[in-house]
Amino acid sequence: MLKKIISGGQTEADRAALDIAMKLRIPHGGWIPKGRMAEAGPLPEHYKLQEMDTEKYSECIKQNVMDSTGTLIISYGSLTGDLDHARKSALRYGRQMLGIDFNHVDDAKAASLLNDWIQLYRIDVLHVIGPSAEVNPYVRNQTENMIEGALTMGSLGK
């Protein structure tokens, strides 16, 4: 039973996950750098994220991984930068991890994979991290479709 969705709020994918949580009345949160800085400027206050004492986003990723039971990493191809850091953190701290590469699966298949993973590993706090719209302009829509699709299968909102 999913109880919370967390994210660092840095990218379109991150904010899409938080927006879906709010829309579906699932508690949300996560850690953000000092000053609430995201890649497009300060994150709006309606996102209930906690500020860290550091400006290093890598520390926020680490804390979000540690505070979750599973990390969903959304990509378009190989993991680099923050996405690879999230992968390494999940491995280091023994947290479950699911990678969805939208170059290889469509939204419906991604929703099915997410649904199955959440049920199989009993993910109750889901950490979502993904790329910006600069990587792919459809990342927000695909992230929303995937999470909402998984919800319609009954895995997240019960």
Image (cartoon, helix red, strand yellow):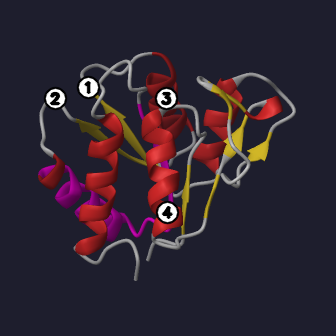
Left or right of residue 49: residue 136: left
What is the quadrant of the N terminus in the image? Answer: bottom left
How crowded pointer 4 is (Cα within 10 Å; few <14, some 14-19, many 20+) is rated as many
Q: Earlier in the sequence, mark 4 or mark 2?
A: 4
Measured from the top left, where is residue 38 in percent x and y? 64, 28
Question: For mark 4, what is the residue?
Answer: 21
Q: Residue at x 74, y 48 (%)?
A: 45
How crowded pointer 3 is (Cα within 10 Å; few <14, some 14-19, many 20+) is rated as some
Badge 2 vs badge 1, beta-carbon distance below 8 Å? yes
Q: Residue at x 45, y 32 (%)?
A: 87
- As helix, strand or loop, the secondary structure at mark 4 comes to helix
Mark 2 or mark 3, which is nearer to you?
A: 2
Quarter occupied by residue 131: top left
Q: Which mark is residue 137?
A: none
Q: Is residue 155 magenta?
A: no
Mark 4 or mark 2, which is nearer to you?
A: 4
Question: For mark 3, what is the residue?
Answer: 88
- As helix, strand or loop, the secondary structure at mark 3 comes to helix
Q: Which mark is residue 76?
A: 1
Question: For mark 2, what is the residue?
Answer: 103
In this view, 85 is above or below 44: above
- As helix, strand or loop, the secondary structure at mark 1 comes to loop
Q: Residue at x 27, y 53 (%)?
A: 146
Measured from the top left, where is residue 153 in percent x and y? 22, 74
Range shown magenta: 109-130
Q: Is residue 129 magenta?
A: yes
- As helix, strand or loop, the secondary structure at mark 2 comes to loop
3D distance between C-alphas at marks 3 and 1: 18 Å
- Three-letter code for the amino acid on which mark 4 is drawn: Ala
